[in-house]
Amino acid sequence: MAASRELAREVHKGFVKMGCKEFSSNWEDLDPADKEFFVGAMTYVLEEEKPLAKDIHSFWLDYMIDKGWVFNGSLDTGEKLSPMMCNYRNLDKESKGRYRVFFSNRPTN
């Protein structure tokens, strides 16, 4: 779990670098539940033999729905609106690419 937590922190940094605004830009300021999202998703990537980006998106989508987020064509963090609140297959290529950060932080041993 400690490895997942450290890697989750790196994934969060990657999300921030990509301009993801749905989460605080500072790990220390993240809501504990947001941290657990990153840790849980990274744990899935580490434990699953063939992890899939669409599964991480589904995990994220369920999490965000529980937090009250809904689909909108443009992002509005104050109103909890995001164009990412849809099925993975409906995401554009750039949005799908944000999940690469999970796999780039996966050890290759």
Image (cartoon, helix red, strand yellow):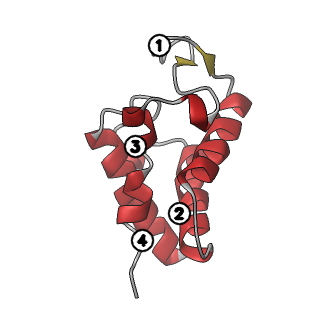
Is residue 16 positioned above or below 50 on the image? above
How far separated are the C-alphas under marks 2 and 1? 26 Å
- Say if residue 24 shows up in the picture: no
Q: Which residue is mark 2?
A: 42
| Inter-mark Cα distance, 1 to 3 | 18 Å
Amino acid type, mark 2: Met
Cβ–Cβ below 8 Å for labels 2 and 1? Answer: no
- State the image coordinates of residue 99 (x, y, percent, origin top left): 45, 49
Front position in the image: 3 or 19? 19
Q: Which residue is mark 3?
A: 98
The numbered mark at residue 76 is 1
Report the amino acid beneath label 3.
Arg
The label nearer to you, 1 versus 3, is 3
Task: Pick whichever, 100 or 3, lies toward us.
Answer: 100
The residue that mark 4 highlights is 106
Disc 3 or 2, which lies upstream in sequence? 2
Q: In x, y percent, where is residue 55?
A: 63, 52
**Which residue is at a point 57% across and 18% down the rendered structure image?**
80
Circle 3 packing at 10 Å, graded few (<14), some (14-19), many (20+), is some
Position of residue 24 relative to residue 11, above or below, is above
Separation (CA) of disc 4 from disc 1: 31 Å
Apparent side of residue 20 relative to residue 40 in the rendered image (left or right): left
